Image: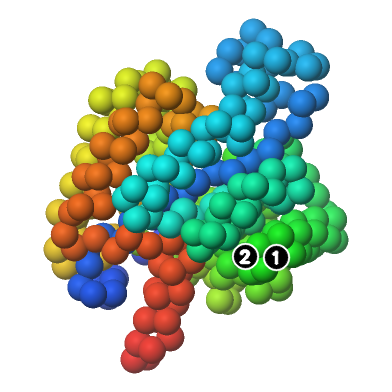
Amino acid sequence: MDNALFDYSPITERPPVQWPGGARVAFYVGLNVEHYQVDLPSTSIFAGTSALKPDPLNYGWRDYGPRVGIWRVIESLDRHGLRASVLLNSDVCARYPQIIQAGLARDWAWLAHGRNNSILHADMSVEQERAYLAEVVGTIERATGRRPRGWMGPGLTETFQTPALLAELGLDYVLDWCNDDQPYPLTVPGMLSVPYSIEVNDISLFVGKSLSGPEFVRIVKDQFDQLYADSADSGRVMALALHPFVVGQPFRHKYLDQALEHIANHPGVWLTTSDEIAAHYAGVRRSAPR
């Protein structure tokens, strides 16, 4: 079937994107703050035990994130003056309230990221999904005092009706379609796609490709440097996708710092959140002459 969610738009044929202050690259950290169920297989470092109930090896690896890794990542973000764009499972709100409090103190942006990361966002009727999304969004709003503006599904999953149902709930954008270096409008009125990354992503690089810390730094720098060069005539977005149980491991900590330092200290960069990127882009589109 044809994709009716968005139209084809070559980046060479669009009006220039301008970021605040004349910045060339809008940079945000997509921080995945997730809960995993102990009796379901999920993201794993060793496939041999992933189907067991319980699976201490893989569950423990994931559980390192909210217990230890997140606090190490927070140190790095604070050091470089970065606010996280948090991809938040709503189950986190009750289970790890200290993380919510840390984020509130730092004015993080909160995006809805499903209920937990053990169950993908699929195989629901319209009414089932409408109720599910309302519950997820409502839980996050009650915990943070702020209604989420954006969505990323667990494992970047959606149904064909997800954007329209999110729009009903007042959300403005999704991160699931990693096919661009700029925001763009979906065919659902008022909904945008904002760039995220499945490649400049610590799971893809460290777990999927078994790269070392210095290789991670080189890739992040290469990604940024190319986007900066591309942005001479029109702004670009760079997302750095992080998971505390991966990049929060002790032996990777200094390499995250090195990667963030390269970007945070570079001129012409808007250090921002995905919420602010979406709001700015939407505001510029509304004010543009027709």
Image spot of residue 118 (x, y percent): 71, 34
Q: Relative to the observer, which residue lies in front, 49 or 264?
A: 264
Relative vertical location of residue 44 with respect to residue 202 in this rendering, above or below: above
Image spot of residue 69 (x, y percent): 52, 33
- Secondary structure beneath disc 1? helix
Counting residues from the start of the chain, the first of labels 2 and 1 encountered is 1
Q: Residue at x 70, y 33 (%)?
A: 36
Q: Is residue 118 visible?
A: yes
Position of 108 with respect to 139 (left or right) is left
Mark 1: amino acid: Glu
On the image, numbered disc 1 is attached to which residue? 141
In the rendered structure, find residue 148 and report the number of the disc placed on it.
2
Q: Relative to the observer, which residue lies in front, 6 or 286?
A: 286
Q: Is residue 1 visible?
A: no
- Secondary structure beneath disc 2? loop
Image spot of residue 250 (x, y percent): 43, 24
Relative vertical location of residue 131 with respect to residue 74 in this rendering, above or below: below
Mark 2 near mark 1, Cβ–Cβ under 8 Å?
Answer: yes
Q: Relative to the observer, which residue lies in front, 170 or 252?
A: 252
Q: Residues within 10 Å of mark 2 (few under 14, many from 20)?
A: many
Position of 176 with respect to 124 (left or right) is left
Q: How many angstroms separate mark 2 from mark 1 (CA)?
A: 7 Å
Quadrant location of the C terminus in the rendered image: bottom left
Relative vertical location of residue 223 with respect to residue 206 in this rendering, above or below: below
Position of 209 with respect to 103 (left or right) is left
Name the outermost residue toward the bottom. 289
Mark 2: amino acid: Pro
Q: Residue at x 23, y 75 (%)?
A: 21
